[in-house]
Amino acid sequence: MPDLPLLLGHRGARASKSIPENTFASFDLALQHGCDGFEFDVRLTGCGRSVVCHDPTIDDVTVSRADASQLTHLPLLEHVLQRYGQRAFLDIELKVAGLESKVLNSLREFRMEEDYVVSSFLSEVVMELKTRSQKIQAGIICDKAGQLVCWRETNADYVIPHYSLVTPKLIKEVQSAGRKLLTWTVNDRKAMLRLAEWGVDGIISDETELLVETFT
């Protein structure tokens, strides 16, 4: 097998039923299980704060219209960077446009130079990030085959397809272009081993205990 891939928790240790995803407790658990880092989601509040959450609505509150005071139970991006930025690989997924400047400022503030990727399904977000900073590590997420044709156009440093889209040919194309390939959400041991043998650069999983146990 090639060098082991990065082992990343999906929204922390998402498979844990007792701990909410996208929280410090979930992030801590993924690291306790032995992951190299984790993926998490960021949205923009109506008052312009960068909050960590996946869904557009939380407890009947629409995040994009909310004041941060209505969402005090959600972590802020800057607090995640401060707490984990120097000890874990962070996959920072931007769910909406409009966060680009805030993310870049936060990365500079907390001196994030490596061991991270700012990712998005939105190609315009990835291109905007790369336009504003050539140094930023940006990634394009894909869940449909048709989206894979645009990864070169975005100038992304990481290509992050759903595992069902990954083939040895795609891995070779991405890596030959000087990019890296992470894949999600891989919750089956056989799939984890197969993807690692093919040479993916990282595996994102809900099943963080299984992920680490598979490679130890």
Image (tube, grey):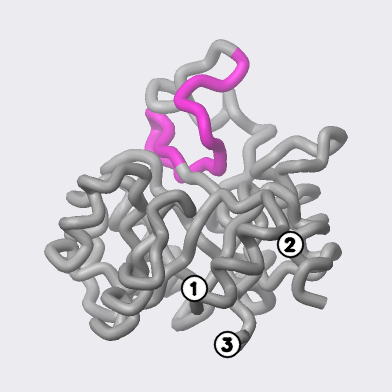
Q: In the rendered structure, does residue 64 fall within the stretch colored magenta?
A: no
Q: Are marks 3 and 1 in contact (CB under 8 Å)?
A: no
Question: Which circle, 2 or 3, is nearer the viewer?
Answer: 3
The alpha-carbon separation of the residues under discs 3 and 1 comes to 9 Å
- Using the image, tell me which numbered label, if any, was put on residue 186: none
Give the residue at x 23% y 73%. 133
Hey, which quadrant is residue 210 in on the image?
bottom right
Hey, which quadrant is residue 211 in on the image?
bottom right
Magenta range: 43-59
The alpha-carbon separation of the residues under discs 1 and 2 comes to 14 Å
Question: In the rendering, at what x and y percent does residue 56 appear?
Answer: 45, 25
Of labels 1 and 2, earlier in sequence is: 1
- The local crowd at label 2, few if under 14, some if 14 to 19, many if 20 or more residues have their Cα within 10 Å, is many
Residue with the mark numbered 2: 211
Residue 111 seen = no
Name the amino acid, label 2.
Leu
Depth check: give the residue in front, 73 or 129: 129
User: From the image, which quarter does the N terminus lie in?
Assistant: bottom right
Residue with the mark numbered 1: 200
Image side of residue 193 versus residue 158, left or right: right
Question: In the rendering, at what x and y percent does residue 146 appear?
Answer: 21, 46
Residue with the mark numbered 3: 2
Name the amino acid, label 1.
Val
The alpha-carbon separation of the residues under discs 2 and 3 comes to 16 Å
- The local crowd at label 3, few if under 14, some if 14 to 19, many if 20 or more residues have their Cα within 10 Å, is few
Callout 3: helix, strand or loop?
loop
Give the residue at x 69% y 40%. 21
Q: Is residue 114 above or below residue 146?
A: below
Question: In the rendering, at what x and y percent does residue 132 appear?
Answer: 19, 67
Name the amino acid, label 3.
Pro
Image side of residue 113 versus residue 213, left or right: left
